Amino acid sequence: AEEMIIRSEKMSIAGQLAAGIAHEIRNPLTSLRGFIQLLQAGLENKQEYYKIMMDEIEKINTITSELLFISKPMTDEKTDEKVSEMLNDVIILLSTHASLFKIELQLQIREDMHIHCDRSQLKQVFINLIKNAIEEMSDGGIIQTIVERQNNCCVISIIDQGPGIPKHLIHKLKEPFFTTKKNGTGLGLMISNQIIENHHGYLEIKSEKNIGSTFSIYIPLN
Ligand code: ADP
Ligand code: MG
């Protein structure tokens, strides 16, 4: 029994992922097969079926593109990048999308820093976190991004005015496939956390019901 416990603890992140992926892709496939059978039977409301089928295909598509991102080899090509520049790029990229939902993206640089990082990967983390914040704020509002220095760390905090995360769920957020969204993949935070760890950093999650959540990225300076 002890050996089994050790073995399951050793089940690699790749193994956990593979099991999850198989499951996540089989569900929409099963549903697609069902709808094709219904269509073969020549039933009415075809348009409705097509819509659901497209959603299922889109789900598989999203999962596979996130997986392609994970499977990219971890090139160790880090450069010195100005934090404010990376965040400006990301905020410009997302602000049109945000304004559709009556959300304003604010950026406050309390202290600008250069960090040694993989620029595109870290930008992906900022995008994932800000997108999550947007997706929680159905009534609109402000998403603040604050950059400051704490001891020997660059801290980037993304603060939303969403509904918050129940305490007992916070530890699940970094696990693959945990999602509360109809079309979520539950991979964004897992990938983000992995990228931050590759920079020897830490992702801190704080939340207060009905006030909002704060995701803080700590990246050690050199
Ligand atoms: P996805 O966005 O596909 O659901 P993520 O890994 O990005 O996957 O997020 C996992 C889950 O964490 C979300 O489904 C949501 O329940 C929760 N979450 C993430 N960000 C926030 C946030 N800013 N506020 C509240 N809940 C959040
Ligand atoms: Mg997400």
Image (cartoon, rainbow, N blue to C red):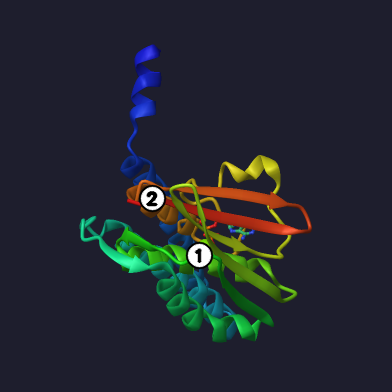
Residue 67: x and y in percent read 34, 60
Alpha-carbon span between mark 2 and mark 1: 25 Å
Residue at x 39%, y 27% (from the top left corner): 9
Residue 26 appears in the figure: no
- Asked if residue 212 is positioned above or below residue 51 in the image, the reply reads above
Q: Quadrant of ligand 1?
A: bottom right
Residue at x 64%, y 70% (from the top left corner): 143
Residue 31: x and y in percent read 50, 63
Horizontal side of residue 36 vs 168, given as left or right: left
- Asked if residue 174 is positioned above or below residue 210 in the image, the reply reads above
Residue at x 49%, y 51% (from the top left corner): 177
Q: Which element carries disc 2, helix, strand or loop? A: helix
Q: Dot 2, crowdedness within 10 Å: few (<14), some or many (≥20)?
A: some
Residue 212: x and y in percent read 71, 59
> Which residue bears the numbered disc 2?
194
Residue 173: x and y in percent read 55, 49
